[in-house]
Amino acid sequence: MTLPIQDRSTAGRQLAQALAPTIPGKEALILALPRGGVPVGREIADRLGIPLDILLVRKLGAPGQRELAIGAIASGGVRVLNQDIVRSLHLSDDEIEELARVEQRELERREQVYLGDRRRREVTGKTIILVDDGVATGATMRAAIQALRLQKPARIIVALPLAPRDTVTMLAREADDVVCLYHPEPFIAIGCWYKDFTQVTDEEVRDLLKDVD
């Protein structure tokens, strides 16, 4: 396995191979983070015979620097802030609240688009495999982990094609296990390590989830 990865589907196939020896299919559930995590999760689900669903999380981008995550929110009212970045940017509580309100609206929109009236799959007591197409700071994934802990899964495994080593170390303190294929340095950005990192659309997400009950 070498970098760059061809595309998200290739990343999913590689992750499925890495996860296969330790995942109990009947007791496991894949939760992919839309949008980029869904094609990765779809491949893992198909190859390992594990049910697929989504967990909605929204990054809080810094004012004027949308790619710089000051934190994230997730379904269930969970909010995670990177206090070091918040302090360095001198952000007020009101500014943070406004960022959160905007992202909460988008989270609710996506929930309706992707899930409609479908009930979420049961999480309690299961091994949850949290999937994304990569992480940088880890704020979004931390919010996902904290949101899941409230639902009392038996185990949380974070599965990633790539991430910085220090981010993996941080996530390992909050998840029960982290499976990460690559730790490129300097990391720069997730898209740098894919040949095809085309943005995933809402329509593609719906398509990938169309056979999810």
Image (cartoon, helix red, strand yellow):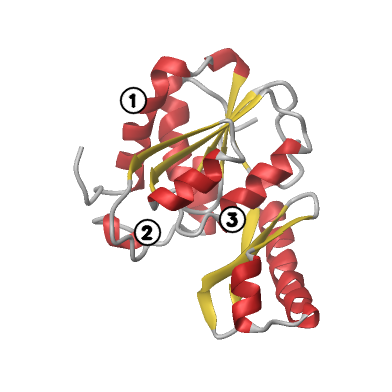
Mark before the other along the chain sequence, 2 or 3: 3
Q: Is residue 111 left or right of residue 66?
A: right
Query: Residue 59: horizontal and vertical position, in percent?
Result: 60, 63
**Badge nearest the viewer, 1 or 3:** 3
Residue sitting at x 58%, y 57%: 139
Q: Is residue 188 above or below residue 51?
A: below
SS class, disc 1: helix
SS class, disc 2: helix
How crowded pointer 1 is (Cα within 10 Å; few <14, some 14-19, many 20+) is rated as few
Mark before the other along the chain sequence, 1 or 3: 1
Q: Amino acid at mark 3?
A: Thr
Residue sitting at x 58%, y 14%: 26
- The image quarter containing residue 63 is bottom right
Q: Is residue 17 left or right of residue 107?
A: left
Q: Which residue is mark 2?
A: 190
Q: Residue 150, can we see it? A: yes
Q: Quadrant of the C terminus?
A: top right
Q: Amino acid at mark 2?
A: Ile
Mark 1–mark 3 distance (CA, rounded to whole Å): 25 Å
How crowded pointer 3 is (Cα within 10 Å; few <14, some 14-19, many 20+) is rated as many
Q: Is residue 130 above or below residue 99?
A: above
Query: Residue 140: horizontal and vertical position, in percent?
Result: 59, 55
Name the mark on residue 140.
Answer: 3
Query: Residue 51: horizontal and vertical position, in percent?
Result: 57, 26
Query: Residue 116: horizontal and vertical position, in percent?
Result: 72, 47
Q: Which residue is mark 1?
A: 17
